[in-house]
Amino acid sequence: MLFLTTVAPWLLLAFLGQQVSLSSGARNKHRGADKTVTAAPDKAPRSRDKSAANGRGKFSINNKIQCTWGAKAVGDAVKLSVKCEDREAHIKGGVTDIKCEYNGKPQSCAGYKSNNKGFWKQVARAFKKLQGKVCSDESKLVRVGICKRAPRDAHFKLDMMSSVNLTQSGEPETHAPPPPQPRATAAAPVKPTACTARVNHLKTAEENCSGSWASVCNFFLTMLQSEDC
């Protein structure tokens, strides 16, 4: 009886301690279950518009100004950069270089991705049709035929703020120097001919022959002159 009286309180304490421990463990487990770990949403990588990389081409204005254009994706839009050069104007003067940009959102056109190659071919044709309006007329859009039903911003519009014209004055024309004029040379003295000498002798004979001998002198001098001339 004494043994039970001594051991019973210890057994009771041990039982209570076990219950407290179990209760504390259950509460901690319940709290851990309530805490939900929210994973950070995966950031999907922003895909670049690879369709724009295929856009490039060449065209000419009035068969003398050579132009090139290239496309580049900028955000949700596509930019067309145009550069033109007139080599003849570098010599004669005038507008030598033309630069500008066109902006559009072709992603809203179904044909932009379904027929990307055909889309850029039609852009090249549209530039050829514009001719002198390129980089100068904001009202003229670069229209694509396969995007007729697409919104207006699917076509490319000129950004007037980007339009730049470079001019240059012509170089002065250089003429070949005139050929040198030949120098005037002094005329050689004319030597008296035989006839001239005879005429002079005749005059002398006439001066020296006088009177009755004049006719005789003239006769002989005339005969001598006719033989030489």
Image: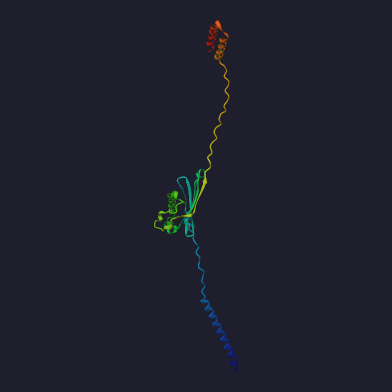
Q: Position of residue 129 (x, y in %)?
A: 42, 49
Task: For the N terminus, give its image quadrant.
Answer: bottom right
Q: Position of residue 29 (x, y in %)?
A: 53, 78
- In the orientation shown, which residue stands out farthest toward the top? 212
Residue in front for this viewpoint, 30 or 110:
110
Residue in front for this viewpoint, 204 or 71:
204
The structure residue drawn at horizontal position 59% and vertical position 93%, both measured from the top left corner, is 5
Q: Is residue 10 above or below residue 95?
A: below
Q: Position of residue 66 (x, y in %)?
A: 48, 47
The structure residue drawn at horizontal position 40% and vertical position 55%, both measured from the top left corner, is 146
Q: Position of residue 121 (x, y in %)?
A: 44, 52
Q: Is residue 140 above or below residue 92?
A: below
Residue in front for this viewpoint, 34 or 88:
88
Number of numbered callouts drawn: 0
Question: In terms of image quadrants, where is residue 193?
Answer: top right
- In the orientation shown, which residue stands out farthest toward the front? 211
